[in-house]
Image: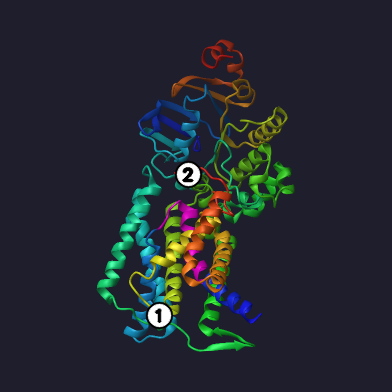
Amino acid sequence: MSDDLVISDLAAGYGHQSVLHDLTLRAEAGRLTAIIGPNGHGKTTLLRAISGLIAARTGEIRLGAERISGLPAEAVVARGIVHVPQGDLLFPDMTVLENLRMGAFLPAAARQERTVLEEVYTLLPKLRDRENQIARTLSGGERRMVGIGRGLMASGRVLMLDEPSLGLAPIVIEQIYEVIAGLRRAGRSILLVEENAMRAAAIADQVHLLDHGTLAWSGTGAELSGRPELLETYLGV
Amino acid sequence: MDVFFQILASGLTLGAVYAISTVGLALVFGAMNMLNMSHGALMALGGYMAWFTMTGLGLPPVAGMLVAVLVCAGVGVMIYLLIAGPMLHSEGFETRVFIATIGFGAMLESVILMAFGPQPKPQPLAVQGGLSVAEVHLPVQNLLILVLAMMLMAALALLLQKSRIGRAIRATAQNRDAARLMGVRVGMVYALVLAISGGLAAVSGITVSSLSSLLPNMGGDPMLKAFIICVVAGLGRVPGSVIAALFIGLFEAVVQYTVGVRFSFASLLLLVIVVLIWKPQGVFGRHQGVRL
């Protein structure tokens, strides 16, 4: 309860363009909450607004008792909300290890860097082999893993993953989702943005469907699996 | 053979002088896509601060260097707070900051002109005498500049590679949004980068004026050459620009000896044209999209 991520009446966008409006939803602590919806309907914008990369225009974002909206990105991550952005956004000229260490940049995370690094290597053993490779030269799946590993290094309270399967081969997607399932079993709070609704339904405790920048439907993953007409209406599948 | 070493020595000195001013420009461009056109005025300010501290206040050379570096670093921070910072998120930041810093540089030069007058002054922070090895004559001042430049480059490399703040600078340069998501306060990084660049400009101004003399507009020519080196190396490539600076120093020394001094700048520009045709992104550059 104390670590729930609560979004109320949120509006956000870019320049003159408004993307999100009147959005209210909750991501409960210790559970995996998935955001699904068609492309261009505000899933990524929501994560960017939560992490402070763009400013919320109206409404409020809270983590537990603390108000997050209005804080700059560097302050939001200091409060424990870690955003693994779409397209990885690695530091291309740094090695894998340097990228991971950047994840633990803030003093609180830096103090337990070694311990967490071992945990990350246990979870993503491939990163240990690639430790000294320059990020730019990695394959798409490896880059994604570095992105997730870097997010884990921050030892945050909420992990936000933006389309972790985007552009990857099916077998690599399976590997990534096994990692996410492992994080869920470990009881981490995860906010997952996923375009593939069935994949999200299979793994999520709670699913929120975004349409035209606002909440169209909420339910459990199992409920979503039993509502094919929803998917047809909103996602055309 | 003696001529060869003589050219090598003067070319490396020239390159070392260029490297100090170029690295400051490259660092700022690499971190924030900003061409600081007031870099030349900062160099003049550094030179005059050393002169003022030593000749005006009668303090020792170390104090002269220190005051110059601190004042110019402070002006660097001021450039961030008053000019670059407020326009950072505006459209067309690169163009705006380019023009704004031209204006700031002109103001700074005018202030120097008003404070110190238009007559050339000798730079007191210079060492007389020379060293003769076989038939090669090396002024001690040139050797000092070479050593100083190498020490500065090594210190900067150490800072960027090994320190926490250095990692923050590199992260910001490589991906600003990602750096913010890691908790890096990019505003602090930008202010710091401009401070370091200002400090390097001060050292550069002192070395340039110690080889010629102090003038309010003395920074114009070295800044132009620093830009040329930046373009040849690839804008924002810090280690590449050091190599390019040394290469261009040697190139200039060779041209000056073989073809004549009056052709050195023209052939430098020719070299830039060739490089831009051959590799438009610079020798060490990689293609990159516009970031802001």
Query: Where residue A169 appears, x then y in whole percent?
Result: 69, 29
Chief secondary structure of the magenta portion: helix
Label 1 CA crowd tier, 10 Å (few <14, some 14–19, many 20+) = many
Where disc 1 sits, the SS reads helix
Q: Is residue A57 left or right of residue A120?
A: left
The kind of secondary structure element at disc 2 is: loop
Which is nearer the eye, A81 or A124? A124
Asked whether, in this view, residue A200 is left or right of residue B25, the answer is right
Task: Work out whether B55 lies above or below A74.
Answer: below
Q: Which chain does tag 1 point to?
A: B
Quick one: which residue is furthest to the top in this view?
A: A229
| Residue B280 in the image: above or below residue A228 | below
How far from the left and from the top, in percent, is residue B185? 46, 52
Distance from the alpha carbon under mark 1 to that under mark 2: 39 Å
Q: Is residue A62 above or below residue A212?
A: below
Does residue B279 appear in the picture of this structure?
A: no
State which region is magenta: B17-36
The N terminus of chain B is located in which quarter? bottom right
Read off the chain for label 2: B
Q: Which residue is mark 1?
A: B64
Q: What residue type is disc 2 on?
A: Arg
Q: For residue A36, which quarter of the picture?
A: top right
Query: Which residue is under mark 2?
Result: B291
Residue B61 is covered by the magenta coloring? no
